[in-house]
Amino acid sequence: MPNLSNRSTAPQPTAQPTLRHTLRAGALASAWALAGAATLALLSSGCAQAPQASGSASPETVQVRVIAFNDLHGHLESSNLTVQVADPAQTGSALRVAVGGADAMAGLVRSLRQSAAHSLVVSSGDLIGATPLVSALFRHESTIEAANLIGVSVATAGNHEFDAGASELLRLLKGGCAEQRPDDPARSCALGPYRGARFPMVSANVRRSGGGSLLAPSWVMQAGPVKVGVIGAVTRTTPQLVVPSGVEGLQFIDEALAINEAAQALQAQGVQALVVTLHEGAEIGGPGQPADWNDRSCPGLRGAAVDIIKRITPAVDLVLTAHTHQGYNCLVDGRPVLQAVAYGRGLSVADLHINTRTGAVDRAKTLARNLPVFNVRTDATHRDKVAAAEPPAYRAALLAARPDAEVAALVQRYAQAAAPQAQRVVGRIARTLDRRGLGDSPAGRLVAQAQWEATRSPDTGGAHFALMNPGGIRADLACRGAPPCEVTYGDLFSMQPFGNSLVVMSLTGAQVRELLEQQQRGGIDAPLLSPSEGLTYRWSRRAPIGQRAQDIRIHGQALNEATLYRVTVNSFMAEGGDGYTVLQRGQQRLGGAQDLDAMLAQLRKGVTDAGLARITITD
């Protein structure tokens, strides 16, 4: 493991604040990224135009407001996004509140910053990737431009930042137009020159295989007489979540070790207030029933992020997490740990009180909350109820926030450019096909069926069946109005935004069984692969590990462990994605159509449904 302590940690000159309180350093961010400066700490002035909130800090203390969001995934439009929050007026009840949209997020960010003398805005990863068409059709330049206007101060890389590889990530940071491939509908510089990110991206645990770092490990903000360091890290499982070409030439080392090295380097520079933005997550509540995102009892807190945080140096004062798309506000080893669901539905806000003499955070005074991003569709009663239960400073910000007109105009321009493609009707469905369920979901069965039918003929692979991973289905296929309902290209793209190709391979019956058994590694309630027609089985949730897939049948015949079967999966799974390593041993591989093309062909056959469940779940 490279030793960070041997590299230069000299701080860089402080950048000047702008009207949007963001580091306008796209070129600078790219320069250090391309150079792989492992411990470069960029300094940015804190927002200083707004007055300090009354009574928020003593003369010996500087208050810094940290505003964070995670897993935006290019959801620039609010669509029909909602969030469930506790009903302050009725214990045990919840409100389903309309939220989201980049313009609404920008408005709340601005409102929160106006009541804080010093503030910074953090994106905790997956800003891009697995996005709606309004981002993906423009190679995510629209999302980076929106983040610039929102006022992002610093971001960390999530696993989806690597979907198109390190070179494309660095281009997005630096700016400039991408090369246009003739067969690629995505367009770069579609609305004019693309100038890149005005904020740096940090990640302490991403290293180049040949030595050095891809991104700086940390960033430093100057807030009056004190400094706040922000350290980034991404889940070390990224190579299992991204196609191999996306992480080629990169290593993802232990998150806690890398964070601790970066923290030590910052402390050596005199930075004592430390924030970690970690693209790994946790969960609270029961399976399928998460607890309220501000429930400080944090029932059943669990997950990879918890294990990592327990190994992080006690010097870290605040941890902003991501990746699991959950909402929680917990204490782990005495420091706040937050996540605000996903898609821009909420913000995590923490007020840190920093001693001007020691530079240390007084953790007893830290105030941390998850706040909903109200928008123009939010019911006024819901807005008033939720805001009334928040601390005064946050209550005022929630009630005063209004959508940002500049961000709204940007999103509208990109949405109009995407409209001809997005609104093209490509088929009809008999009902809503959603992603829910422990077994095979209706959406999953439809996708798997489309992929099998695209590869079942001898000349396209001779597949016996297909399997679809639930994580590859990013949206329900909703039936709007009376069925049969029209489906647009934009609907399909939101459902399958990755652009994976189909791969047919030969597996023995024993390997098919091994593949199905690999589903249990996430626990008894882990979602299962959705099969196409041709594969049925019984899943015994509480059977011994290795014996949970039972009565496996291929087109009605019992599985023969010595027989070779032709199996279709997407290219992500074919390389062992989501931990299905047995697929790496598949033989006689044949590449096929794009996943989206298979769905388009399926919908052209007539009014579409998903058929009956093919997995029987038992205890």
Image (cartoon, rainbow, N blue to C red):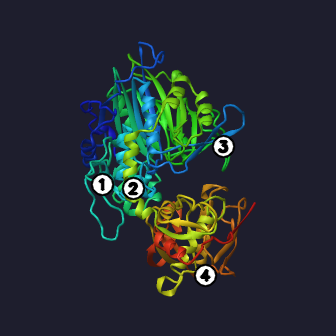
Question: Is residue 187 shown above or below 512?
Answer: above
Question: Is residue 141 shown above or below 495?
Answer: above
Out of 610 and 242, give the one closest to the viewer: 610
**Which is nearer the N-term, disc 1 or disc 3?**
1
Q: Which residue is mark 4?
A: 562
Question: Residue 97 location in percent, x, y?
Answer: 60, 42
Mark pair 1, 2: CA separation: 11 Å
- The amino acid type of the residue labelled 1 equals Leu
**Which is nearer the N-term, disc 2 or disc 3?**
3
- Label 2 with label 3: CB-CB less than 8 Å: no
**Which is nearer the N-term, disc 3 or disc 4?**
3
Q: Is residue 263 visible?
A: no
Q: Badge 1: few (under 14), some or many (20 or more) residues near its Cα, within 10 Å?
A: few
**Which is nearer the N-term, disc 4 or disc 2?**
2
Question: Is residue 176 shown above or below 591?
Answer: above
State which quadrant residue 522 falls in.
bottom right
Q: Which residue is mark 2?
A: 416
Find numbered disc 4 in the image and state the secondary structure of the residue it sits on: loop
Label 1 or label 3, whichever lies nearer to me, is 1
**Which is nearer the N-term, disc 1 or disc 2?**
1
State which quadrant residue 293 falls in.
top right
Find numbered disc 1 in the image and state the secondary structure of the residue it sits on: loop
Label 3 or label 4, whichever lies nearer to me, is 3
Q: Which residue is mark 3?
A: 285
Q: Badge 4: few (under 14), some or many (20 or more) residues near its Cα, within 10 Å?
A: few
Find numbered disc 2 in the image and state the secondary structure of the residue it sits on: helix
- The amino acid type of the residue labelled 2 equals Gln
